[in-house]
Image (cartoon, rainbow, N blue to C red):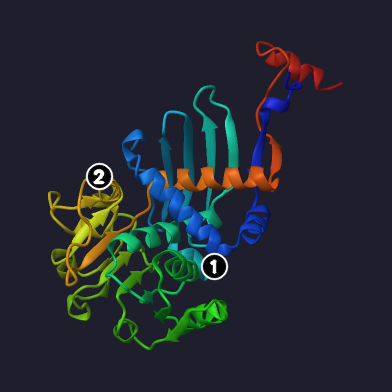
Amino acid sequence: MTPPGQLALVPFLSVETMMRLVHHIGLEAMLSDLAAEIEADFARWESFDKVARVASHSDVGVIELMPTSDGETYGFKYVNGHPKNMKEGRQTVTAFGLLADVSNGYPVLLSEMTLLTALRTAATSAMAARWLAPLGARTMAMIGNGAQAEFQALAMKGVAGIGAVRLWDIDRAATDKVVRNLAGTGLDVTACDSAEEAMLGAQIVTTCTADKQNATILTDNMLGAGVHLNAVGGDCPGKTELHRDILNRSSIFVEYAPQTRVEGEIQQLDPDHPVTEFWQVVTGAAEGRISPDQVTLFDSVGFAVEDFSALRYVRRKAQESALYESLDLLADPDDPRDLYGMVMRSTT
C-alpha cells in the first residue's frame, strides 16, 4: 500500500536537473532521441486531442497555453514570447510543462521547459528536414543567431546529416557567440556578413529571428531551386520572416493548419491556400519532396504534441537515471473526504 501522502509527490525537473539530464544523455544523443520520439507521435497523430494554443497577446509579447492528450496522458505547456526581454537581460521565451494521468487526473511530471522547448524545437526542425531536404544536403544557413541557433545546428547535424553551417545575424556579437559555442562539435562553421552570403551553397535554410513584426528576412530572389526552408521565427499573429513570393512557389508543410494559418508564415496567404500537415508525410498519406528542384517550406510554429513528446521522453529518462526531485504539490489526506481535518492536524 502506498504510504499516506506519497501519492501526492510529483516528480519535478528543475533547470539545474534538466541540465544534468542533458549532460547525462549527451546533447546530440538527446536531440536525436527527441526527434525520434516526436516523429513516433506524428505517426499516431490522429490519436491526439488537437486545439490551437490559447494565447493572450499584449503590445510587447504573448503568453500561451498548449494542451493535448492521447487519451491516457494529458499534457500542457505554459510559454511566453517577449522579444523585448533580450534588451532587459531576460530570455525571450520561457516555459514550463506538466503531464497528468488521464485516469485519475493526478500530475505525474512537472518540468522546466525553457531548455526543453529549445531542444524539442530543434529536434522537430531536424526531423522535418530529414524528410523534406534535398538528398545529400550537407550545408545549412542559420539566419538569426540567438538562443535557438546552436540547438538547431546540432540537431541538423545529428538527425539530418549536415556538416557545415553558415551564420548571419544583424548583431555580429550573436554570430560570434554561436561560432564560439560550436567550436569542437565537428561542424564547419562560417560567420557571414549578410543573409545572402550565408545562403550561398546552403541546401537547408533556417530562419529564427525574434522581432514581433511582419519582417522580410528573406526575399524570393535570394532563394534558389531545390532548397528546404525551415521557418521557425514566425510564430504568432503579425510576426513573419519570409516574403509572400517565397510562399507562393513553395510546397508548404505545417504542424496543425488551424493554428499555423493564424500564427505562421502562411498568415500572409489566402485562408484556403493548400498546405500539407506534416503527420501525413510521416504516415505516407501525402508526399513530401518529389523533385530535386522543389522548394519545400516547413512553416514551424510549434505544437502541443511536440511538447507532449518531449515531456514524456524526459519523464522516462529522469526515472531511469533518478535525476528528478519530488514536489509536495497536491493535498492528499488519509481520508479523501477530510481535507479540513488534514489542515487542522497540521498544527500538531
**Which of labels 1 and 2 is toward the front?**
2
Q: Position of residue 18 (x, y in %)?
A: 63, 54
Q: Disc 2 marks which amino acid?
A: Pro
Q: Which residue is mark 2?
A: 258
Q: Disc 1 marks which amino acid?
A: Glu
Q: Which residue is mark 1?
A: 88
Quarter containing the N terminus: top right
Q: Secondary structure at mark 1?
A: helix
Instruction: Identify the mark at residue 48; answer none if there is no mark.
Output: none
Point out the residue furthest to the right here: 348
What's the residue at 28%, 70% (across, down)?
135
Crowding around mark 1 (Cα neighbors within 10 Å: few <14, some 14 to 19, many 20+) is few
Q: Nearer the viewer, residue 145 or 135?
A: 135
Q: Position of residue 3 (x, y in %)?
A: 76, 22
What's the residue at 40%, 43% (across, down)?
41
Q: Is residue 217 above or below residue 254?
A: below
Q: Nearer the viewer, residue 81 or 316?
A: 316
| Residue 238, quarter of the rendered image | bottom left
> Which badge, 1 or 2, is on the more N-terminal residue?
1
Q: Secondary structure at mark 2?
A: helix
* Structural distance between the alpha carbons of marks 1 and 2: 34 Å
Quarter containing the C terminus: top right
What's the residue at 42%, 28% (across, down)?
71
Q: Position of residue 203 (x, y in %)?
A: 29, 75
Q: Position of residue 256 (x, y in %)?
A: 29, 46
Q: Is residue 115 left or right of residue 171?
A: right
Q: Is residue 262 above or below residue 140?
A: above
